Amino acid sequence: MKILKIAALSAVFAAQFAFAQFKQTPLPYAYNALEGSVDAQTMEIHYSKHAAGYVANLNKAIAGTPQEKQTLFQILSEISKLTPAVRNNAGGHYNHELFWTVLTPVKDTKPSEKLAKAITETFGSMDAFKEKISKAGADRFGSGWAWLSVDKNGKLFVSSTANQDNPLMDVVEEKGTPILGIDVWEHAYYLKYQNKRADYLTAIWNVLNWKEVSRRYDEALSKK
């Protein structure tokens, strides 16, 4: 049932980008479902305050503009032409909608054989990959994200972006399709981990939804 719920969430997540105005997708788990790694209070504030704010502010920023009739992907692809308000809030909306789906209370999910092989071929091993993306998150000065993405040639790469930028935007140096994003804004971890971002980045692997990351990998490859 939980897997079906994640799949349904992913379908809603994809479908909503065909239309504006934008809306939050309901969480596929309870606020306290990730306890031990992400506490309930953080999850509730993160989802109902921070993420909800990005959606509301995005809708305000695009009201009466051509972007009101564009998909989120179209908006992100030409973000350099748009206002900081659109950039920050469109990025915040996309990033968080992805983030919720790549977390799960289901224990010990595994990447698909195809994704596991690609990770090993690209980074040397799963442990080396985890070290690389965790370092990208830990080294991000201030607020931002760490990403695993697929580039235009179908190859995996790890990157980090500031604030609410992401690899879909035309303003970033390393462009691609994100399949895993880790939020390293302080509001994602500070209530539980205080200034220990590295501890949060270690704990996040305990609730990572590898089935969803694998699905996104297959989807990204199918578009190449």
Image: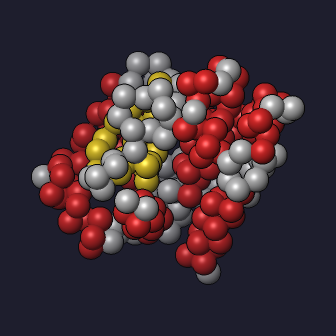
Q: Quadrant of the N terminus?
A: bottom right
Q: Quarter of the image holding residue 41? A: top right
Q: Quadrant of the C terminus?
A: bottom left
Q: Residue at x 79, y 40 (%)?
A: 68
Q: Is residue 147 above or below residue 120?
A: above
Image side of residue 3 versus residue 62, left or right: left
Q: Is residue 185 above or below residue 181?
A: above
* Number of numbered discs: 0
**Residue extending furthest bottom?**
1
Q: Whole-percent x and y of residue 51? A: 69, 39
Q: Is residue 18 above or below residue 113?
A: above
Q: Residue at x 49, y 41 (%)?
A: 168
Examine the rendering and report whether any part of residue 65 can be seen: yes
Image side of residue 2 versus residue 176, left or right: right
Q: Whole-percent x and y of residue 84? A: 65, 20
Q: Quarter of the image holding residue 56? A: top right
Q: Whole-percent x and y of residue 81? A: 61, 24
Image side of residue 51 versus residue 166, left or right: right
Nearer the observer, 75 or 13: 75
Q: Whole-percent x and y of residue 192? A: 54, 36
Nearer the observer, 173 or 7: 173
Instruction: Give the colouring mode of the picture.
Output: secondary structure
Q: Residue at x 43, y 53 (%)?
A: 179
Image side of residue 12 versus residue 159, left or right: right
Nearer the observer, 158 or 222: 222
Examine the rendering and report whether any part of residue 186 can be seen: no
Q: Residue at x 58, y 30 (%)?
A: 79
**Residue extending furthest right?**
64
